[in-house]
Image: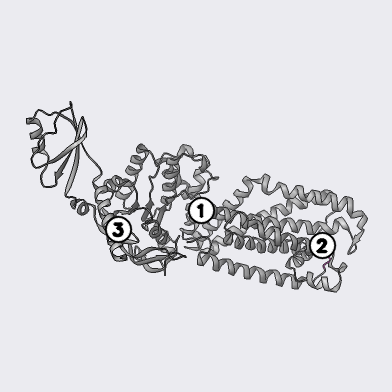
Amino acid sequence: MKALSVSGLHKTYTGGVQALNGIDLSVDEGDFFALLGPNGAGKSTAIGIITSLVNKSAGSIRVFDHDLDTDPTAVKACIGLVPQEFNFNTFEPTREIVLNQAGYYGIPRREASVRAELLLRELDLWDKRREVARNLSGGMKRRLMIARALVHRPRLLILDEPTAGVDIEIRRSMWRFLREINREGTTIILTTHYLEEAESLCRNIAIIDHGQIIEDTSMKSLLAKLQVEHFILDLHQPIDVLPDLPGYRAHWVDELSMEVEVDKAQGINELFAMLTSRGIEVTSLRNKSNRLEELFMHLVEQGATRSTESAA
Amino acid sequence: MSPREILTAFQTIVVKEVLRFLRIWMQTILPPAITTCLYFIIFGNLIGPRIGDMDGFDYMDFIVPGLIMMAVITNAYSNVVSSFFGSKFQRHIEEMIISPVPNSVIILGFVAGGVVRGLLVGLVVTLVAMLFSDLSLYNAWVTVSVVFLTSVLFSLGGLINGVYARSFDDISIVPTFILTPLTYLGGVFYSINLLSDFWQGLSKLNPILYMVNTFRYGFLGVSDISLGTAYTIIVIFIAILFLVALRLLRRGVGVRT
């Protein structure tokens, strides 16, 4: 079953700004799906329409076979949303925020209390349950929004940049938590600016730019499009001359590290053999940049070129 | 949603709304008590005896129902307008918008919060009034029903104001420039029988006059207008405002982009 089917979705804001230009999107039940795009591409507008926060101009949305136009109550009951901006009452205690959200979904107080305790404990917020939300740190506020979004046990969880401004330790604990609930059956749609986050978590991906889907495929297929990888090699001691490495393109980064461009078909064993034969000792090796980031930039640049050409 | 789930959602909104104004009772409950106390001292004790009787009652006894009603109107309205606008401002209205809770339940929840505050403030002001006046009820049913319906009406008014409001200025314009003048000119401090025919006719266009007079009837047994007309007007206004609020929320005015 499809968790989400979006068809011909258009949004034109008052004033004429066209945020979405007929997007089609399909997310399978149980998927962990990334929706990426540069700022202003239309991600948040699309999420806003799916979650009933934004009125669409045209198109249709189905969530677990419920149509948003004809059965909005069923659609809303299926969705949990972690928005980009904090949108809770900052004067309310943490636990109250989660309990109230459960109440809006008709969950009786007693059951809501059990669920809220479970979630707040899992997300390391139980000690802060009586604290008013404005006193929480940024990371705690993000986790509070996750707890709130999950209290009615949605089948589809939508996270709009959930780890923005969160330190790496908390981000990784949030990743573990999201992987766990996805394993338990919750379909997840994620937007993020941390592309390694999408690469690490998501199985399928769509890239949106200028209100259009420019790529919609599996993460594996997308990454397979990458033809070249750049590696940074840190050297044990400085060398005077850049070594001649036939078949590889190399240049200095600084006196103790060099960047080597490796074609996808080549592999790096031969590179290391050449370096060893020249007496060059490598202490560490790393990717120059996130692989997905390179592809993302490439696709967005292509999209921008297409837009310019069509405008011309 | 099943009726039971709808009831849970309604209770959630009401409890949230009541806790909101109780948390800040120094701003919401105490000021009306102090203001009304000053009215009683100045208009009732100091100026009242010089005015003499009004409609056959001590001036103090005459103004007490109007002052209670004034506090109820102001607080029911301002509770809902500030709470609804606050939830838009902080964006936590989105918690309700994304949930399956029906729009009618959102409206009733906010209105119930305004009614509870209006009635609670009305009770506090009544207790204060008992220090200055020998209050007695002429008709408890009329008193209770009209104060309840009036607080419903002005809570709905506050909600609609909150829907349209885009800034904090917008939530004070209606109370300052419309509600307060209509309340003062709604027969709180005087009987419209004192006015010339023209001004009496004009006063009868003021809906608050009907509420104040009906409430006064509940205490004193006298009214400048007929109770049937008053109830009809109040109920019609409630029905119209409820439908307007429902339509606004359905269209997402002020809450959806």
Q: Which residue is mark 3?
A: A304
Circle nearer the N terminus (2, 1): 1
Respond whether the residues carrying marks 3 and 1 are from the same subunit.
Answer: no
Query: Local crowd at mark 3 within 10 Å, few (<14), some, or many (≥20)?
Result: some
- Give residue B125's position: percent from left, percent from top: 76, 51
Query: Local crowd at mark 1 within 10 Å, few (<14), some, or many (≥20)?
Result: some
Q: Which residue is mark 2?
A: B138
Distance between the Cα atoms at labels 3 and 1? 33 Å
Q: Amino acid at mark 3?
A: Ala
Residue A178 numbered tag: none
- Give residue B185's position: percent from left, percent from top: 78, 63
Dot 3 falls on a residue whose secondary structure is helix
Q: Is residue B62 visible?
A: yes
Distance between the Cα atoms at labels 2 and 1? 46 Å
Write down the chain letter for disc 2: B
Q: Is residue A26 visible?
A: no
- Give residue B128's position: percent from left, percent from top: 79, 49
Dot 1 falls on a residue whose secondary structure is loop
